[in-house]
Image (cartoon, helix red, strand yellow):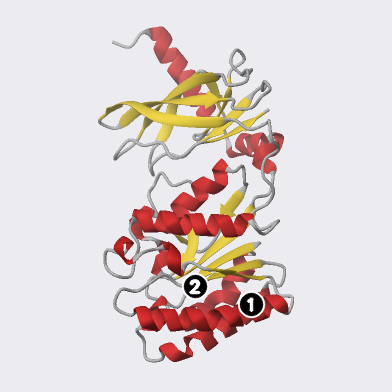
């Protein structure tokens, strides 16, 4: 039987977690990390951008950006990937050709105003009726994007291999590179990303779409390209003020689970406080927290006794969550005070 004291503590935590939207909004205003505007990045393309249930390259790219201290928000009208994936938005439309993206891109740009665009498109054109005209269509699409969003950084990649149409893909890639470089030379914010050699045929189970290893390789190419263009993914966090948060599930039961998060200070100087943000599977909610103070179902700040963390030291907080389905805690981010 649950003790009266434990029941009372649980009820008090539940009240805190159920704070009104007004209170939640105020906490975001008071927290500089929460109020900072993220760089809006639009992953744009077809099913290779959508990435199926594993989230495609977006999963590992998002993790790389967070690990590098970049405050980035993927934007778009679609959301795909595992429930634990922190940022699932994109404009990757399975089966779409260059012309279909061209017909919709202005509306997307107006709606989501991305600072940076990642474009991988043309795969479905390769086995369509006019693969030879695909470079011209891509050129027109890029011109439309740069006219609508002249301040955006537009990263356009060569497309990855197709097992049964490799010669066609190579011809397309060879044709688009000089077209794109000419636009950059004319002063447009267009950047060529050579994606083709990054993903071997062995990483394409169906001959077209990458497996997790292939998508991870794509993420690395995108990350390196973005890192080479100042401003495209904002500025990294100031050295010495970052912290890391590592979650793990420690127990499960029907309808809920228990987890703990290790907060570490990797810097050479002490930090005075921390705030950790994490995601839970759809339908789950935090019901109890210890070793920290909840300010929303996925945000925990330090308690009064464990905010200060010395160089290389760690503290741990834990929580209970309830909801249907498998237990999981998505990648966590940590902001130091």
Q: Is residue 48 above or below residue 132?
A: above
Tell me the SS state at disc 2.
loop
Q: Foreground: 321 or 184?
A: 184
Mark 1 = which residue? 181
Regarding mark 1 in the picture, which secondary structure is present there? helix
Q: Is residue 3 above or below residue 197?
A: above
Give the x, y percent position of residue 116: 62, 62
Residue farthest to the right?
A: 187
Q: Position of residue 47 (x, y in %)?
A: 39, 68
Q: Is residue 50 above or below residue 65?
A: below
Q: Residues within 10 Å of mark 1 (few under 14, many from 20)?
A: some
Camera sees residue 88 = no
The quarter in which the C terminus is drawn is top right
Front position in the image: 158 or 105: 158
Q: Which residue sits at x=44%, y=13%?
A: 8
Q: Residue under circle 2?
A: 158
């Amino acid at each position: 039987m649950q003790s009266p004291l434990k029941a009372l503590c649980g009820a008090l935590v539940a009240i805190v977690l159920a704070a009104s939207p007004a209170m939640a909004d105020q906490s975001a205003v008071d927290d500089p990390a929460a109020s900072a505007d993220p760089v809006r990045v639009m992953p744009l393309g077809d099913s290779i951008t959508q990435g199926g249930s594993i989230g495609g390259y977006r999963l590992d790219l998002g993790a790389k950006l967070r690990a590098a201290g970049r405050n980035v928000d993927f934007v778009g009208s679609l959301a795909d990937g595992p429930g634990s994936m922190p940022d699932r938005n994109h404009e990757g439309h399975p089966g779409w050709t260059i012309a279909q993206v061209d017909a919709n891109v202005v509306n997307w740009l107006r709606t989501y105003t991305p600072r940076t665009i990642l474009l991988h498109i043309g795969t479905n054109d390769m086995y369509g009726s006019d693969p030879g005209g695909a470079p011209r269509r891509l050129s027109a699409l890029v011109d439309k994007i740069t006219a609508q969003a002249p301040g955006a950084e537009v990263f356009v990649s060569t497309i990855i291999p197709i097992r049964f149409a490799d010669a066609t893909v190579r011809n397309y890639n060879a044709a688009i590179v000089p077209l794109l470089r000419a636009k950059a030379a004319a002063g447009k914010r267009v950047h060529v990303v050579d994606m083709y050699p990054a993903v071997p045929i062995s990483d394409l189970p169906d001959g077209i779409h990458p497996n997790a290893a292939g998508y991870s390789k794509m993420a690395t190419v995108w990350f390196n390209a973005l890192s080479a263009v100042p401003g495209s993914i904002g500025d990294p966090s100031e050295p010495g003020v970052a912290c890391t948060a590592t979650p793990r599930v420690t127990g499960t039961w029907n309808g809920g689970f228990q987890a703990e998060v290790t907060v570490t200070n990797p810097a050479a100087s002490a930090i005075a406080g921390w705030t950790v943000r994490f995601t839970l599977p759809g339908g789950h909610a935090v019901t109890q927290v210890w070793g920290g103070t909840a300010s929303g179902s996925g945000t925990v700040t330090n308690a009064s006794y464990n905010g200060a963390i010395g160089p290389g030291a760690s503290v741990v907080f834990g929580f209970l969550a309830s909801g249907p389905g498998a237990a999981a805690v998505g990648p966590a981010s940590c902001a130091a005070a």
